[in-house]
Image (tube, rainbow, N blue to C red):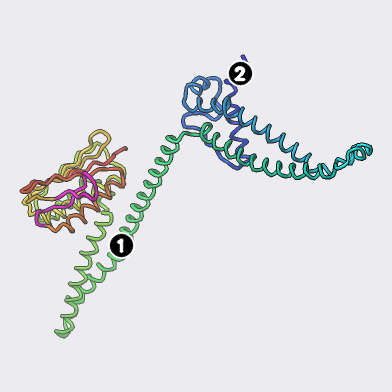
Amino acid sequence: MAVVVAVAAAPLLSWTQRQRFRLLFGVHIAVPDGLAERPGLRGMVPWLLSAAGRRQLRYHFLAGPLIVLGGTLTLACWVVGAAAATVYLWIWVTPTHWRIDSPGYATKAAYVTVAGVALLYGTGWFAKALARVDTAAARTLLGPSREEQLARRVTDLADSRASVIDAADAERRRIERDLHDGAQQRLVALAVNLGLAKATLGDLSDEARAVIDDAHREAKEAITELGNLVRGLHPAVLEDRGLDAALSGIAARLPVPVRVAVDLPHRPPPTIEAVAYFVVSEALTNVVKHARATRAEVTVEQVGGTLLAVVTDDGVGGAELSTELGAGHGAGHGAEAGAASRGTGMAGLAKRVASVDGTLSCHSPVGGPTVITVELPCVP
């Protein structure tokens, strides 16, 4: 009966022990995953059947009694040591005839005092060691297991990484808006004013008109370059209309015919959508620069909880897989492209895909075709 009562009281004892460690030692012992800190009657059976519950029972029935025994021994040593160390203070309480009939008691008292001081010192060391052992046992048996701690750490790191990625994406969007609404508009106004100057100022010298023509041309080229930069940071069409429109816009600007097929039941999360866009954009850029292809094809679809993007071209192939990045990370497009240029571009794509727990693979036999496959976790 006593055992049943003790087992039933184990959750309350665990809560009490956690409070003791928090108040006395400043040690926070977390509640194991899947267990309530103070389960009610309905939660007793799951608590007892869980591995964490069994660990806590081992603490209360094995480690706990040993710690109590050690604490009792420590208290006894404190009392004995204190009595021995102060023997000169209370020896005078004894009857006078005892001191007279016991010659040499002062020497014996000195030995007892030294022994008492040594016992107090040793007991202090033992008490600290006992507290460390008790804390270690409580963390191991009352708290989450090593596997649970690692799982929590992985979850925390994943959440932290996701926050950093979201913050970086938000910063890119802010820079894109600032450039689009600020510097780009000023350049457009400058180009318009220069164009008006060319059209309305007829009494200019040839030298002045040449200067205005050069400035007008430079302003238009700057607008084009800034527009490309803005689209590279975060295209507004991607945020407004999604992957289909954004990738179609890229394909329309390329000198190589590109067929784009996007079949998504709903829009993926913004971060996944941005990663997919930039990976496909860079892959198509590599097609133009290195592959010597006559056509390319982009397919984006959702398979279960995964966004699958495939970029195919009929170029010369011969891309090598980067051994530095591990299996599935491509080295670039084109059989004659330099190894450094191939590795640098695809290495960046592989790292960006890996930042959201995705995978990138490249199949490119000599003579083609080259197929780049990207798999991204897509949870709506």
- Whole-percent x, y for residue 138 in the image: 55, 34
- In front here: 6 or 78? 78
- In front here: 156 or 253? 156
Using residue 104 as the reference point, say whether residue 328 is left or right of it.
left
Q: Main secondary structure of the magenta part?
A: loop
Residue 7 vertical position relative to residue 86 in the rendered view, above or below: above
Mark 2 residue element: helix
Q: Quadrant of the C terminus?
A: top left
Choose top left, top right, bottom left or bottom right for residue 61: top right
What's the mark number on residue 5? 2
Q: Amino acid at mark 2?
A: Val
Q: In this view, which residue lies farthest toward the right?
A: 97
What's the mark number on residue 266? none
Q: Mark 2 or mark 1: which comes first in sequence? A: 2
Mark 1 residue element: helix
What's the residue at 35%, 49% (across, down)?
Answer: 165
Q: Amino acid at mark 1?
A: Leu
- Whole-percent x, y for residue 85 in the image: 77, 43
Q: Which residue is mark 1?
A: 179
Using residue 52 as the reference point, say whether residue 199 is left or right of it.
left
- Whole-percent x, y for residue 89 in the image: 85, 44
- In front here: 5 or 260? 5
What's the residue at 32%, 64% (across, down)?
Answer: 182
> What is the magenta range?
320-336
Asked if residue 249 can be seen in this view, the reply is no
Q: In this view, which residue lies farthest toward the top?
A: 1
